[in-house]
Image (spheres, rainbow, N blue to C red):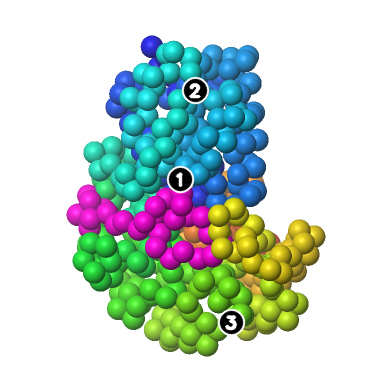
Amino acid sequence: MFRHFKIITLGCAKNSVDSEQIYSLLCKKGLKPVEDISQAEIILLNTCGFIESAKQESIETILELAKYKEEGNCHYLIMVGCLVQKYAEELKEVLPEVDLFLGTGDLLELPKMLTFLKGGETVIRVSQPENHLYDDCLKRDYTSERSYAYVKIAEGCNNFCTYCVIPQLRGAYRSRSIDSIVREVKELTANGITEIILIAQDTTYYGIDLAGKYLLPDLLRQLVKIPGLRWLRLHYCYPEHLTEELLQVIKNEEKICKYLDMPFQHISNAILKAMGRPMRKRETLSLIKKIKSIIPRVALRSTFIVGFPGETPEHFNELLAFLQEVKFERAGFFAYSREPDTPAALLPGQISPEEKLKRLEIATHLQEKILAAQQAQFVNQTVEIIVDGISSDYEGLWEGRTESDSPEIDGLVYFKPKPQIKIGDIIKVKITHSENYALIGEICDEFSE
């Protein structure tokens, strides 16, 4: 039996959690992970199918991995996840190199499905996404030391935005129990993790399916009691479900990062209506004002889609004016991707790729200027950061993040380490200068208590 495996993960942090569960599942069954992919007899690609560029990346990656079947030790090439959930039959036709296709609802069936591969036929297992949520018995195992861990508190989505395929890929919203999440966070912090990042397609909707009411505030109150936890961060907060109770918990609990990631997607009422987003411009501005009044030092992060069908130059300029007015501490932008089987794909007024790219560049450039001005204000200020480890960008320096920076998507703080510093420590750094998305500084003291 082939026993060595390698997992490649594309897409979002939710996919990363799934891959960590698959990793533990295979290890539990006696298989062994390898760092060198050329030594793997089983190579698994966890795919993303959210937008066209992600789908293309998945296809290109699997074709690159196929060379290990031709030239190396690889005997089985496996694709799992979102892209497979929607396009398994089409993928089978164009990718004969792949031996097994598993959908998002079938991840835990992997060991059993491996036994079906001996006949040499391509195997497909794609059932309903709701068949899978999370296996509490699988202990996540990290192959490298880090300060943070993502914890998936729910799966699926009930929002049905007109441009989005997530409900097709991940199914209806379903929450894990509070007890299950608390147990996992305790295990992670006991193993040295100091920052927990809660994720779901919509974290603020958490608990509706369990209790008929929002349970995120209750979950947070339980998590902050865990002794080893230093920072607790929220991602993907759907604005319509952001309650005052939740804001008060974020404000009052010291361990909760004063950081909110809320995907507003646009600000023009006409575009928001076409997107199927229930919140309009007036409500959005009111919510932002309310958040800042309750949590004055909050860092707001959002994402926006440019080039949505029917977005006129006036609508786009309205978005730019909104960005200039609010001055989000963090923001990301995407060009609209026309996804099959979505209502938005049928809308009139589809915008050319060239125009979408132009608008993407304009919005991104504006946010870069806003960020540069904000970053410059930190010079000569002292900030608290969590230590992530040795920098790959600056030789001899280490890197960390402020409370306003989430891993991989936001900025970094670089500093010269001292011998006692280790990954996961929270320290104070005096900023000496800023550079693009980065801050550079010097340690003020060994540790902050």
Determine the secondary structure under disc 2.
loop
Q: Using the numbered discs, state the Cα–Cα distance from disc 1 to disc 2 in whole angstroms.
A: 24 Å
Q: Position of residue 220 (x, y in %)?
A: 28, 65
Q: The N terminus appears in which quarter of the rendering?
A: top left
Q: Nearer the viewer, residue 406 or 49?
A: 49
Give the residue number, with chain letter if any, for mark 2.
122
Q: Position of residue 293 (x, y in %)?
A: 43, 86
Residue 167, visible in the rendered structure: yes
Q: Position of residue 108 (x, y in %)?
A: 33, 35
- Give the amino acid at mark 3: Asn
Q: Nearer the viewer, residue 199 or 91?
A: 91
Crowding at mark 2 (Cα within 10 Å: few <14, some 14-19, many 20+): some
Give the residue number, with chain letter if any, for mark 3.
269
Q: Position of residue 90 (x, y in %)?
A: 57, 36
Magenta-highlighted residues: 156-183
Residue 423, visible in the rendered structure: no
Give the residue number, with chain letter if any, for mark 1.
15
Crowding at mark 1 (Cα within 10 Å: few <14, some 14-19, many 20+): some
Please give the name of the residue rendered at 60% of the width and 47% of the height, measured from the top-left corner: 54
Q: The C terminus appears in which quarter of the rendering?
A: bottom left
Determine the secondary structure under disc 3.
helix
Q: Earlier in the sequence, mark 2 or mark 3?
A: 2
13 over 237 or under it: above or below: above
Please give the name of the residue rendered at 63% of the width and 14% of the height, measured from the top-left corner: 71
Asked whether, in this view, residue 96 is left or right of residue 188, the answer is: right
Please give the name of the residue rendered at 64% of the width and 57% of the height, measured from the top-left corner: 338
Q: Earlier in the sequence, mark 1 or mark 2?
A: 1
